[in-house]
Structures are given as C-alpha cells and as structure tokens.
Amino acid sequence: MGLVGGWVVDMAGVARAKYVPTTRTEAFQVHGMGASPSWSVFCVDGSIAFTPELNVVGDLRIRIDPDDLRTVADGVAIAPGDLYLQDGTPSPMCARSVLKRTVDEAGAAGLRARVGAELECTLLRTDGERATGRGWTPYGLGSSLARSALLVDLAESAERAGLGVEQLHTEYGRDQREVSLSPADPVAAADAVVLGRAVIGRVAERHGLGVSFSPVPFAGDAGNGAHLHLSVETANGPVFSGGSGAHELTDDGASAIAGVLSTLPELIGVYAGSAVSARRLVPGNWAGAALCWGLENREAAVRLVAAGPASAHGANIELKVVDPSANPYLATAALLGSVRRGIELGLAPVAPVDVDPARSGQDLAVLPTHQAAALDALAGSEVARELLGTPVVEGLLAVRRHEVTAFAGLPLAESAEALRLAWSW
C-alpha cells in the first residue's frame, strides 16, 4: 500500500499537503480532506496570521483529481489540490482556483496563453550550510560534472514524474542549479513548479544534500529566481511577434507589455513579497530590478525573447522579478491578468530599453525597494483586488506583514539563515 498526497500553496508561498492510503484516493477526490482555515494564512515561520474573516472556526476541504497524480518517491504520489468550502464552492483564497478563473477570463477575451517556469535553487549540506567550499566556477563544466550523478538522477526522476524539462545546468551562484520547465497551459505550468521543486528536493535528499529555494539563501551570494515566461495568441496569431512595432511586436503585444509594467509596482508584493525578496531585486543581479522592458535585456523587469530559429517555442516575455517565495499560482494569475488588462485597455506602447538600464541615462521608475513599501503598494491596489480578489490580497498582506514584524529588524545574514529552508519542499 502506498500514499496519495494533495498539495496546496498558501499565501506565504509554502506548499502544504495531506496524505491518505491509496485505497482512499476516491474519497480524496469526491469528499476531500479537511483543512482548517489557517491553511490559507500560515506564515513561513509556522505562525498563523488570522484575519477577521479567518480564525479558529470553520473547515476547508482539499480535493484532488487522480489523473493529476505523479510519483515523487517510492510508494508516494502527489497531486495539486483545490480548496473548497464546506458547501462545495471553491474557497475565495484558493490560489489554484484564482488562476483557473484568470485563464477563463483570458479565454473569454480571446487570449490563449502558455507559461514556462525556471526553477533556480541552491544545493546545501544536510545541516543547511554550503554544499561545497571554494573552487566554484559559474556555469562551469567541472562544477556540473562534480554533481553529474545528481543531474542524471534529476533528469530521470523528472521524466518518471511526467515533468517536462527543457534544460538543467549549473548556475552563476555557488552550488546553484537551474531547471527550465517546458511551456504548458498556465494552470499546468504552476502545478509543474510545485512538482518540480518536490522532485528536486527528493533527488537532493537521495544524494545526501539539502536544497534551498530562498530568494537569498546566503548574504552576499547570488539569489534564486523563479522567472516566468509567457506567450500569448489571439485569433490573429502570436502577439509578441509578426507585428510592425518595436522588435516586431503587434499592437496587442505592445499593450500586453505595457499592462505588465503598469501593474508591476502594485503587484511586486505578489511576485517577490517576502522578507528577503527585496535583497535580490537590486541592479546587477539580473533580477529585473529596472521597471522597463527590452529585447533580451536581463536587467529589465520584462525581457522579450524574440521569435526566430533560436527560439524553440516562439516569441515570449519573461518576467524576471518573480522569486521562489511567491505562490506560483498567484504570480501566474497576476502576470496573465495584467497582460489581459493591458490588451483590453489598449495601453500605449512603452519604448524598449535595449542597454543596461543603469547605463541608459533614462530616469526609469523603480520598484518598491523594501518589503513594507511593497506591501503598502499592494494594500492600496485596486488592480490587485480586481485580478486576485480581496480575500487573497488581505491574506497576502496578513502573512507578509507578519514577516515584516518578525524579520525586518534582522541583519541580512540572520534573516537569510532563518529563511534558508522556508520554501524548500
């Protein structure tokens, strides 16, 4: 007999799960497994950020679809879960349901989207410290071959789990790895982020290692991103190529990018809202700290990947600010909703920045540089409430403001250490 698990990702970006024996899989689908309302407002340190609407009273149900089950360990299969109220309606704080609704709204507007995610992580010793000493070479052949058994295991484990992997490699930071996932419909893509991180964690464990998905696992080192790539089509074809605008954008493509940039200051608390996120979002980190877009510009918040023989999946935009502390369902919903909004409003094109923004000579707007400022922007955002719903926004604010209280006064080295494993699954 094995186990079947169902996961949900909370407002703090942490995946939580319940398990049943395989003989109870049908019950997990039909009736669901109970979860207290606190599941929506758990914090990264295990605290609970109760709100007037969420307290000790009530119950939720986690339901799974057995067709979504994927094997991640011997005898253990897991699937994404949806949160339901006791009356059988989706919980307004179910992030996966919010993304499903966003996809439906995009479809009603004539938009079809595909999303691909990048998973950056840092390998650790089992005690949470650095896995290797000096001698690390960014993107180094030797650095990757030194862990070749792990990389082979990862590729094979991903295939067994039905996870599409485009590439995997050693990254810039010490002990850092990246796995690029195949594009899929937005809900499946967000599911793949959770599944991918679970697979990476189990593989690392088999090789006597831990893994960190923190945006800043070590003070002074390269941070981990969770970049999202988005392609969009209308009845007329792809919006990010084949047009007469800058870098062959169509009118809809230009408006889509304008939509993302126009909402980004208000939604940075969704994409990168944790206590350590702002420490990654600085110029020079290739984290998209500049509020602009550009062709293949890795310092811009939005990078355009043009169509052509070098682009296997066609033109797309990459939102670089997203980090692993974000709920992947909410981040994807915010991105897709901003694109839809930009196209529907016909927002005016924004001129590209095709040099390093720090050397552009332009007076570019900046993203909120502190967690508290990002949360204040989110709290005052009507767009966030329109795209994600007020219950989600209030839940996000509750759990992230707890982080401000708990971690804002700590030096970076201490907060990085305290949160190093917070988002490790």
Image: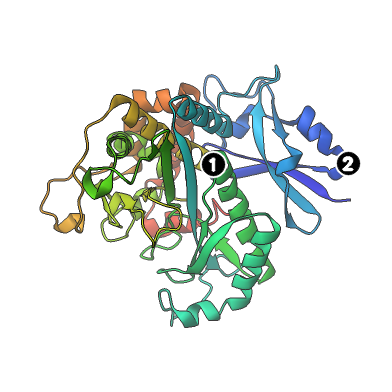
Q: Which residue is mark 2?
A: 23
Taking the image as shown, residue 166 lies to the left or right of residue 373, namely right
Q: Which mark is residue 185?
A: 1
Q: Residue furthest top?
A: 87
Tag nearer the camera, 2 or 1:
1
Q: Residue at horizontal 44%, vertical 48%? A: 228
Q: Amino acid at mark 2?
A: Thr
Number of labelled discs?
Answer: 2
Residue 2 visible in the picture: yes
Q: Amino acid at mark 1?
A: Asp
Q: Is residue 27 above or below residue 129?
A: above
Nearest the eye: 345 or 75: 345
Q: Is residue 132 above or below residue 382?
A: below
Taking the image as shown, residue 11 lies to the left or right of residue 84, namely left
Residue 240 at x, y = what percent?
34, 44
Q: Residues within 10 Å of mark 2 (few under 14, many from 20)?
A: few
Taking the image as shown, residue 408 lies to the left or right of residue 395, namely left
Q: Residue at horizontal 75%, vertical 30%? A: 32
